[in-house]
Every structure is written in structure tokens, then in C-alpha cells.
Amino acid sequence: MMAHYDEPFGCCQTLIVQYRAVRPPSDDPKGELHIGRSALFVGRRQMGRSGPRLFRAEGLEQVSLRRRRLQDAGHLLGNNGLVPEVLLTGSAGRVGRAAQPVLASRGWTVRPFDSVDGCDLRDEGAVRAAVRGCDAVVHAGALAHDTAGTPADIVATNVLGTWHVLCAAESAGASRVVYFSSAQVFGCAEGEGSPVYLPIDDDHPARAARPYGMSKRLAEEMCDAWSSRTSIPSVVLRPVMILDEQSLDRMSEREADFGAFVHVDDVAEAIALALEADVPLHVRLTLCGPGLFDTAAASKILGWRARRGWPTQQPV
């Protein structure tokens, strides 16, 4: 590997890299620069300020990876196939299956991690091995309902498992973590309680006390504290009930809490935007199509909007 520093560019120095490096240089003790898996993705560790950048040694051509990942990476890097890699936990679940082709179409190499393949979020060593070399993490793996396991299993998987993911992402030098929470954190789902106000937005108090909702509530706070300590952004996505085409046929607006759902394809789009957008160090964003939830924050920060409504409605 050969690399050298050039003149400062904006808020971060420009780094010319010809071959692979896997950790920041020793003269950058604060981790101001992050060198990703291919040593070609360079930027501030607090990526919300500048976003990931791709540099080419000749002429220092600078190309934003936010919107032009696949085509520009292929053009600039030739046949090396060096594209950003993301770990996707819960990759075999409803969200994971929908997210994979969307991420691939935007130039991400997706590394799967799911219990159906024998992967276990409670195994710290396995999580660290899975994250190693990844540029970002999408953490969608969880026991996703109060009926999915015992309270102890739910908390161990969803809280301790998230801690393992965050620590592994830090060790790997990941540029950000996208964490899947749930609108159940508000404590209003399935008869648990009543909202303080409607529509529910991201400033609504998180009051969940059942195992699943509480595990998500605790993990959100963990992400916030972790980002404050590491300066690595964490984007928390809070979807309401997620439906695909088959489950949409079996559910009606009248049956849904607050008439709310979000289509899994819209959720997959939010994941891609959460990896690409300029974001604060920590942010929590509700995802909803139709229903009594306010998604203005997701629209403002990610540029996201749901496109699917109930079958009898026009698109949202």
C-alpha cells in the first residue's frame, strides 16, 4: 500500500491511496479520517458532515458515493470490483430480502447475517468476524415480537446483540450504523397504551414496557450513547407495521393500529437513503405510509416518502 496526504480539503484532509489499507494511519490518532475496506472510501468519521467520498489518485477526481455508487465505482476503479460492503443482519427476513436487491442496485456488496444460516447476534465473536472489513452496517436482525421468544431471549438478542453489532462496527471502522427499531417504542401498539398526541412523531415519548418494545427502546438509547462516544453516526429507523404484497392482502386499514402500515419496498428504499444521506450524529426516524404517524423527519433528513398506500387508496 502506498498513500500520502495532500493539502487539506474542506473539513478533512485528502488522502491519495493506491492500494489497500485497513486502518487509519498512526499519525491520525483521533480517527479523523476513515479508510474503508478497499482503502478508497475516505472521509470524516462523523460522516454526516461530509458523506463518504471516493478519490482517484490521478487528478484527485472526487465523486460522491451518495447517488452514483455502482456506475461511478465501476468507471473509476476499472475491473477491480472494489465497491463498498455492508453487513446486513436479519438478511433472510422480510426487510432483509427486500433490501438486498435495492442495496446491490446502488453499488453495495451485501454481506448477509441471519439466524437461518446459523448466525447468532448473541455470539460476540461471530458478530465481530461478520462485520470485519465492512464499510457500514444495517442491523435489522431481531426477535421481532413479544411472541418470538421468552422475555430473556428477546432482551438478549435485541439489546445485547445490538451492543455486539455496535462494538464490532467500531472495531471495523465502519462509517455508520443503520439500526432497525420499531414504532412500538412509543408504547401504543396492540393495546399497550394510548398516545399522548396524534399524529405520533419522533418527539413522542417512548414508553414501551413490553419485552419487544422495551428492547428496542433500550437499544435506541444505546445507539445514541455509542455515537456520542465514537463519533460514528447511527440512524435509527422506526417503521410501523411492515407489510408486503401477500400480507397486505390479508390486512385491512380498520385492523391496523392507527390505520398505519409501511410497505416493505418503501422500507428498503429508506435503508439505502439512510446509508447515503448526510445525517446528524444520531437520529431517530419514523417510517409510515398511511396512518396517524408523522414522517416529516424522515422526509427532511433522508428525502424519503412512502409510495404505497392501502389497496383502496391512491399512492401516498
Image: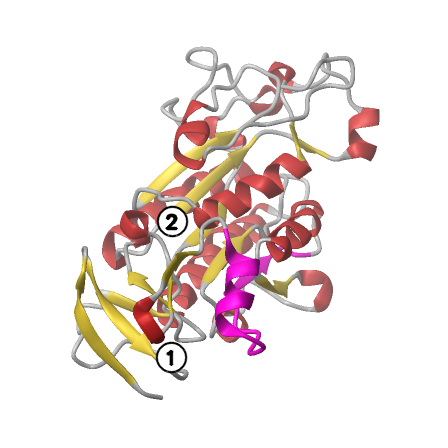
Tell me, yes or no, whether the highlighted magenta stretch contains residue 151. no
Name the secondary structure under disc 2.
Answer: strand
Name the secondary structure under disc 1.
Answer: loop
- Left or right: residue 289 versus residue 295 is right
- Seen from the viewer's position, the closer of residues 62 and 146 is 62
User: Magenta residues?
Assistant: 68-91
Q: Position of residue 12 (x, y in %)?
A: 21, 61
- Which residue does the image show at 60% across and 19% down from the upper left? 191
- The residue where tag 2 is placed is 234
Q: Position of residue 130 (x, y in %)?
A: 54, 71
CB within 8 Å, label 2 to label 1: no
Displayed quadrant of residue 259: top right
Q: Position of residue 279 (x, y in %)?
A: 35, 43
- Answer with mark 2 or mark 1, whichever residue precedes in sequence: 1
Name the kind of residue labelled 1 in the image. Val
Name the kind of residue labelled 2 in the image. Ser
- The residue where tag 1 is placed is 22
Residue 157 in the image: above or below residue 287: below
Extreme bottom residue here? 1
